[in-house]
Image (tube, helix red, strand yellow):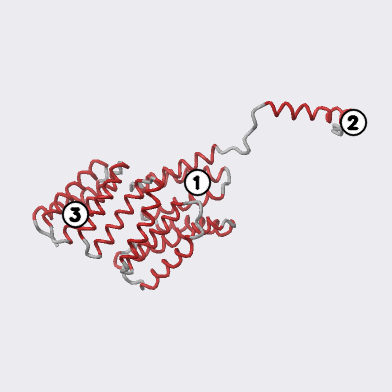
Amino acid sequence: MKDTRFTGSLFVFLLALLPCVFSACSSAPKQPAQTSLARDAAAVQLEQANREADRGNYALALSLASEARRLAISVDDPALRIRTGLSMGNSLFFLGRRDEADEVWRAAWEEAEAGGDAEMAAISRIYRARRDLLSLIIPANSLSRGLMPDETIADIRLRVQAEIGAVKTDPLSAALGWIVIGLAEKELGRYREAEDALRKALAIHDKERYLEQAAYDWYLIASVFSVAGQYDDALAALQEALSFDRRAENGYALGQDWLAIGDVYVKAGKRDQSAPAYHRAAEIFRAGGFTAEAEYAEDLYRSGHSGQGS
């Protein structure tokens, strides 16, 4: 076997070399403390995934988030692992794959709770509350709507209120918390409180220049005004949503904005003004390749244009 022990003279020689080694290093560019190429790529993929989800492209969003998760796993980044899991669950939920969404979300929640990062745990719990609220207000079986007591929604609101203070470095997650609170307040019929919460989310998104999210905030504010019977305010809020979505070139959301404008006109007893809005929505959806949404809007346009329908 080869003897790898240093002899006395060799050891002295190596010690003599140490100053040379370190002085040579000091004259060369310092190496980075860590390499972050994969982390940066994962973060970019994740942001793009979330943007596509905001645009209604959930299949593409899921694909992008899945690749971001692969990168996050490859470098064993705990926060990115959790964030990519939360994003994947979001897309799976809106694709109607709720069992898969729950499985992915559960893994992210458990990792966040076990990781010792108080902020990530709080963010995870906000996402979990969002999932619980969406399951109540967008049930898989529409016939089950209304079977859950309001106390459950009030509990969700309180859960999120308890978590927002722990979110110090992630304004988008804090904004999500305010959206969940706003939606819960709306479901509870507390419309002024709902508007206030949603405007807090809007202030964050506007400051951070997240156009799609700011547009969605205005869309939600409009929905609060609509259920409260404040139709002029709802239409004004939807004009704000249109402005942001146009800047973001978010075709799917633009179609939804025009659909909502048509719905508000119908609720306000101005069916004749709803038809052009539905027609505009159908055009936008068709141009963007959202066929099912385009056909739905066209049906509403034909109903409104003929002066028939409920």
Which residue is pictured at 12% across the width and 57% down the height? 271
Residue type at mark 3: give it.
Gly
For numbered disc 3, what is the local secondary structure?
A: helix
Which residue is pictured at 56% across the width and 50% down the height? 78
The single residue placed furthest to the left in the displayed view is 306
Q: Which residue is mark 1?
A: 69
Marks 3 and 2, how far apart in space?
Answer: 88 Å
In front of the other: label 1 or label 3?
Answer: 3
Q: Position of residue 209 (x, y in %)?
A: 38, 45
CB contact under 8 Å: marks 3 and 2: no
The single residue placed furthest to the right in the displayed view is 8
Marks 1 and 3, how far apart in space?
Answer: 40 Å
Marked residue nearer the N-terminal end (1 or 3):
1
Q: Is residue 133 left or right of residue 272?
A: right
Residue type at mark 1: give it.
Arg
Marked residue nearer the N-terminal end (2 or 1):
2
Q: Which residue is mark 2?
A: 7
Q: Quadrant of the C terminus?
A: bottom left
Compared to 282, does 114 lie above or below?
A: below
Residue 157: quadrant of the picture? bottom left
| Viewer-proximal residue among 193 and 135 | 193
Q: Position of residue 281 (x, y in %)?
A: 21, 48
Q: Is residue 243 left or right of residue 206?
A: left
CB contact under 8 Å: marks 1 and 3: no
Q: Which residue is mark 3?
A: 262
